[in-house]
Image (cartoon, helix red, strand yellow):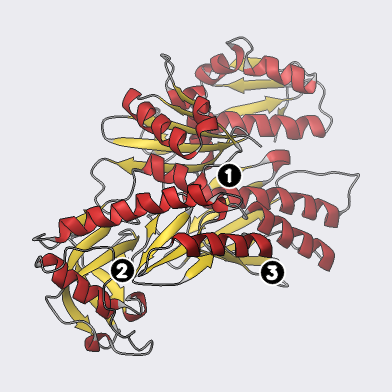
Amino acid sequence: MNKELIIRSNSSAIDFALLKDGKLIELHKEDNDSNFSVGDIYLAKIRKAVPGLNAAFVNVGYEKDGFLHYHDLGPQISSLMKFIKRVSTGKLRDYSLKNYSFEKDIDKDGSITDVLKSNQSILVQIVKEPISTKGPRISSELSLAGRYIVLVPFSNRISVSQKIEDKEEKDRLKRLVKSIKPKGFGVIVRTVAEGKKVADLDKDLQNLMNRWTGMCKKLYKASTPSKVLGELNRANSLLRDMFNESFTSICTDEEALYTQIKDYVSEISPDKESIVKQYQSNVPIFEKFGIERQIKTGFGKTVSMSKGAYLVIEHTEAMHVIDVNSGNRSNKAKNQEETALEVNLISATEVARQLRLRDMGGIIVVDFIDMNKAENRKALYNHLRDEMSDDRAKHKILPPTKFGLIQITRQRVRPEMNIKTREKNPNGDGEIEAPIVVINKINADLQKLIKKGHKKLSLSAHPFVAAYLTRGIPSPRSKWFFDHKRWVKILPRDAYTYLEYHFHDSKGEEIN
């Protein structure tokens, strides 16, 4: 498995595309004017506490107040509030917490009005970016994420990622962290820390302590609301959370970004520094790696897959609904149950990819093709779980129902990636599908016709589409010949609309 991170920079935004064996699985955009990112810490002000919701609305500088629920305060909120007050007024200059006297933990079933009052200053962290009409979701249980560990102020707990299954390794990491952990701070050991030495963990810990100290220094006489600690830029935060030995290439078209990423990779994984490359070519970077084509074909309402199957993705206010269709395909060698299982397994792989690609969150219902055998339903469920195992977003998958439905909940912390794939109709008003999508449809239709036994085929299409299919070395038509051993005659038709096409048999009759 090869993983490539391709980064495109322009004046208004930076786009990040993660490829797995050449296929686009994640797409992120970082706007230069984006002020609220997951992980940012703000010195904010309590607007009002609402007992009925057991939550407070907090002014973080966004047009709508952030929402802070009682359960997101953290047990040591009283200690945090006292710390903020003393540091802001200059009465406390020791930020290490080793000599700090902690307050009693708050009652886990208490009331928000017993803890927070209007106009109080409070440190909060963004846990969900503003989405649609809602303001950011925030927490005052702070955490600072590093490469190998997460530092949690006002805590003494040590925990290890559940993805590390070896009990001996878990115990080893706990012992190492206990020997270096500063008093007053908790530590969460991340999955990538497996097998690492104490020196690696300690270096990461010191970097996080330096960030904590730098943030605390900003609190003195700071105005509210204001950002006191920003997350790493999206490139470095992606590398921090995802980078592993399977990465084979990191490529960017901007020199400053190239230098920044190279320095970061040399710090976290010196032996992988050589995979960072600066792209230098007249061909746009997303065109070169085939990303633009995948964006055009991957974000529409209908998503084509191999062997004629396709997904239909609908978005509603309450949930996302994905319908699996086998398409116009037949396989005489297999019965209906085996065909359904084959299509469902292909679809499960694509569903897992689409959830990451579009960053779809909330409730997702997938309507797979019905299967009668329990072992096939179990195989589908296990396959979907395996395909989603490397999804960084928290998720839960329920087993298939009797109707073939699989329900998924997936954490959403950023607005869903929504890219418009339809284009203005050059023949008149309205919109049409992107021409590149039509090329994929022609490919799929051709495969179906050849499977049905058609020997001689001709294709009539608009002159622009006909020219695209016949020009170039190799041309799309030449590729058809190598793949299917069929030479397709292509006829340009001036009378056709831009994206109209029809196949004809050896007698010249149109094939429906």
Three-letter code for the amino acid on which mark 3 is drawn = Pro
Where does residue 335 sit, x and y in percent of width and height?
88, 53
Amino acid type, callout 2:
Lys
Kindly report which numbered mark, 1 or 2, lies closer to the viewer in this rendering. 2
Q: What residue is disc 3 on?
A: 399
Q: Secondary structure at mark 3?
A: loop
Q: Where does residue 323 sit, x and y in percent of width and height?
A: 61, 57
Q: Can you say which quadrant of the picture contains the C terminus?
A: top right
Residue 422 appears anywhere in the view: no
Residue 98, numbered circle: 2
Of the image marks 1 and 2, the number of the one nearer the N terminus: 2
Picture mark count:
3
Q: Which residue is at 49% across, 68% downward?
A: 158
Q: Amino acid at mark 1?
A: Val
Category of crowding for the residue at label 1, using alpha-carbon neighbours closer than 10 angstroms: few (below 14), some (14–19), many (at least 20):
some
Q: Nearer the viewer, residue 278 or 461?
A: 278
Distance of label 3 from label 1 (alpha carbons): 24 Å
| Residue at the disc numbered 1 | 303
